[in-house]
Amino acid sequence: MITTRCIFLTVLGLLSMVAWAQERPDQSSLDTLNWDEIRYAAFHSDTISMENWRSFSLPVNTMVDSRAGVRVRQNAATGSNFSYELDGLNSVSYFLDGLPIRYMGSAMQINNMPTALLDKVEVFKGVTPVYLGSDGLGGTVNMVTRKVDSSFISASYAYGSFNTQQAHLQGQWTNKRSGFTVKAMTYFTDAENNYEIDVDVPNQTGFIERISAERFNDDFRSLFGKIDLGFTNVSWADELFVGLVVSDLEEGIQTGSDLAIPLGDVQRDEEFLMPAITYKKNDIFVKGLSLDLFGSYAMTKRTFTDTSSFVYNWRGERILTRAFPGELVNGGSLNEVEDKALIVRVFPQFQFSDDHKIVLNYTLEDLERESEDEFNPLPFSSEPTKYTTHTAGLGWQGNWLQGRLYSNLFAKYFRFNSSATQMAFAGSQELEGDDSQVGFGLATSYKI
C-alpha cells in the first residue's frame, strides 16, 4: 500500500514539473477560464445534459438511473414515492437551481419534472461543492432549468399507458430596450395507474387464492405553474425577478401495509403557494465581485382523507359497511398539515485574480408547522412545530499549473434547532433539539 502511494506521488510530482516547464498561456485564454469546470473539478460528480432529450417524454429519474453508481428506486405508479442511492448511500438532498426543494411542494420533485424544462442534472456523490447548501451525507442532485437571453416558447404533450398524460408549456419574452422580461412555465401530469397486479386474497372457502386485479384507487394528478416578472441585463442587475409558484396535487392511496385489503376512498391532497424574489449581479461594487440573492416564503397545505365506512374488494365493489369510519386508520382521519417556510440564500463570489476565486454560500431554512385532525386529535399536535437550519460554506477555487491542476479548499458549517409540543392523554410535553457541526475538505484534480 505504501509503495503504491509512493509511486503515485512520484508520478504526480514529475507531471507537475513538466507542467511548470510549459509556456505560460496568453491572457485571452485566462479570461475565458471555465469556472464551472473548476467548481466541479475533483468532486465525484456526473453532469447529465438534457439538450438531446427535450423532445422525448422520458422521466428524469430514468435518465439519472442510467448513470454508474446511481440507483433509483421507485414504485411502478406515476408520481409514486422514490429514493436515490449514490454509491450505496441514501442520504440524498435535492435542489433546483442550487436551492433546496424540500419545502417547494410535492409537485416540484425530480420524478415529476419534465426533461424539456431542464438544461442539465448535476449528481454529486458524497462531498458536494460549497455553492450547494446541503446536509445530505450521501450526495446531492441538482436540477438546472433552461436559461436563455432571447424570447422563446416551447410546448409538449404525451399520452401513454394507463391513461397517462403529460404536458408542459414554457416561454419567455424580453424587451431588449428596457430589459423587461416575463418568464413562465407550467407542467401537468395525470395518470390513472390502473395496471393489473397479482394479489393473494381469501376465497369463499377460506383458502388463499392468487388473483389478477386492477388498481382502481391509485390515480395521480399534479399541476405546477411558475411566473417571473422582472428585468435582465440592465446596468443595475443582471437578473431581478419577482415570481410566484403555485401547484396542486391529488393522489389516491390504493393499499396500506396489507396488499390483500384494497382501499377505495383514501386520498392525499396538497396545495402550494410561494412568492419569491431573485437578484443577480456580476462586478457589483468592485470588479470580480458577484452577488446572487434569493428569498421566498412557501405555504403548503396537505390533507389526508380517510373518512369512508365502506369496505372494498379488488373489483372496486363496496361489499360491507363498517359501523365506524376509516379504511386505513381506525376511527377515521381528516388530517390537515400547514407548513410555512422561509428560504433565504446569499451567494457572493469574488474572483481576486485570473486563477483564483473565493465563494461564500449561506442558506437559511425556517419552517413552522401546524396540524390538526377532526376525527382523531390526540396523535397529532395542534401546536406549531418549528425547525430552523443554517448552512454556510466558504471555499477557495484555484487554477494552478497553467490550467492542469484544479483545487477546491472549503469549510462548511451546519446548524439546526427544533421545537415541538407533543400531545398525549396526560397533557403535553415540550420537545427541543439543537446541534451544529463544522467540516473541512480539499478536492483536487490534475489533467494529464
Image (cartoon, grey):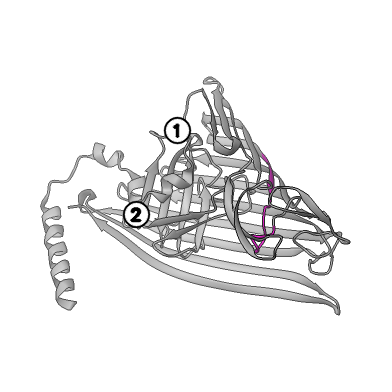
Q: Amino acid at mark 2?
A: Ala
Residue 173 in picture, x, y percent from top left: 56, 23
The residue positioned farthest toward the right in the image shown: 323
Q: Secondary structure at mark 2?
A: loop
Which residue in the structure is indicated by mark 1? 56
Q: Residues within 10 Å of mark 1 (few under 14, many from 20)?
A: few
Q: Secondary structure at mark 1?
A: loop
Look at 17% across and 52% down and name the residue there.
448
**In the image, residue 256 lies in the stretch drawn in magenta:** yes
Look at 83% across and 69% down and name the residue there.
378
- Relative placement, left or right, of 385 versus 78 is right
**In the image, residue 233 lies in the stretch drawn in magenta:** no
- Residue 246 quadrant: top right
- The residues colored magenta run 246-261
Q: Quadrant of the N terminus?
A: bottom left
Give the label on residue 68, or none. 2
Q: Are marks 1 and 2 in contact (CB under 8 Å)?
A: no
Residue sitting nearer the eye, 45 or 380: 380
Q: Residues within 10 Å of mark 2 (few under 14, many from 20)?
A: few
- Relative placement, left or right, of 1 versus 107 is left
Residue 359 in picture, x, y percent from top left: 44, 54
Give the label on residue 401, or none. none
Task: Say above or below: 383 vs 272.
Answer: below
